[in-house]
Image: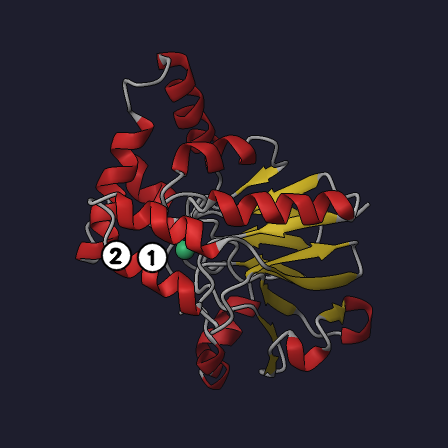
Amino acid sequence: MSIAILADIHANIEALTRVFEDMDQRGITRIVCLGDVIGYGPDPRECLKMCFASEVAIMGNHEEAVMFYGEDFNPKARASLEWTKDQLNSTDYERTENYDLWNFLGTMQQVVEDDDVMYTHGSPRVPTREYVVPADSRNTEKMAGIFELIKKVCFIGHSHIPHIYTSDMKHASPESLGGAIDLRKLGDRKVLINTGSVGQPRDGDKRSSYVTFDGNIVRFHRIEYDVQTTVDKIYAEERIPNFLADRLLVGR
Ligand SMILES: [Fe+2]
């Protein structure tokens, strides 16, 4: 049975709703959530609630920051972080509903391994912090250190750039592979797969990105959503910097 793997939703309910609709059409009900459900976007409560159903919930740096600390957040990320925290504690809602949100955050794990499949937010070395980007394929020491911790396949988010990295130091965009990769064709090679971002893509394509995985084949999906509605909500909330809306329009 296939699973859907979703990362970096970033409180974008318009994007998440469309991704759930796409999953429905594919008959997929199992969800792995790779973290950063919240932060940047205007609907943290609703996005968290939609993710309650995840069978694996990984902690992103934004969840870590609302729960523990966020000293290394830049001013724009910090502004949205403080606003998000206030939303989760809002007295406009039943106290039990707020508890449910915080309890769900508290269940999030840094790394989950299911046989030879690993899930984490950033990288297996520094789960909520380390970025892996295409240029890292030239950094053989970094990539070798990461692959040492992976049994066969590891799914990540964090950079918001959908990409495939293999332990022979090669890398590829999903498009260059026809949008799918068959793990059976990898031989002895291990693979690190960034699913891309549901709610704030940064690869120049503003559509949501997520993957489905049937145990052998990983398929990348790009889903159009009503970007303007999310943008307008961010503009209307003075505590969320407008820059976080503008980037959604261009996927950067
Ligand atoms: Fe993120």
Label 2 sits on residue: 242
Front-lying residue, 64 or 140: 64
Front-lying residue, 15 or 142: 15
The quadrant of the picture occupied by the N terminus is top right
Q: Is residue 218 left or right of residue 237?
A: right
**Image coordinates for residue 170, horizontal then vertical, percent:** 60, 83
Q: Is mark 2 within 8 Å of ligand 1?
A: no
Quick check: can you spot residue 74? Answer: yes
Q: Is residue 138 left or right of residue 185?
A: left
**Image coordinates for residue 46, horizontal then vertical, percent:** 46, 33
> Crowdedness of circle 2 by 10 Å Cα count: few (<14), some, many (20+)?
some
Marks 1,2: beta carbons within 8 A: yes
Which residue shows up at 31% across the image and 35% down it?
67
- Residue 44's mark? none
Asked which quadrant contains residue 52, the reply is top right
Q: Amino acid at mark 1?
A: Ala
Relative to 11, residue 219 above or below:
below
**Image coordinates for residue 214, horizontal then vertical, percent:** 79, 54
Label 1 sits on residue: 245
Q: Quadrant of ligand 1?
A: bottom left
> Crowdedness of circle 1 by 10 Å Cα count: few (<14), some, many (20+)?
many
**Image coordinates for residue 248, horizontal then vertical, percent:** 41, 61
Q: Is residue 246 left or right of residue 133?
A: left
Under circle 2, the secondary element is loop
Q: Is residue 87 left or right of residue 214?
A: left
The quadrant of the picture occupied by the C terminus is bottom left
Spatial CA distance of label 1 from label 2 is 5 Å
Relative to 91, residue 74 above or below:
below
Quick check: can you spot residue 73? Answer: no
Relative to 121, residue 163 above or below:
below
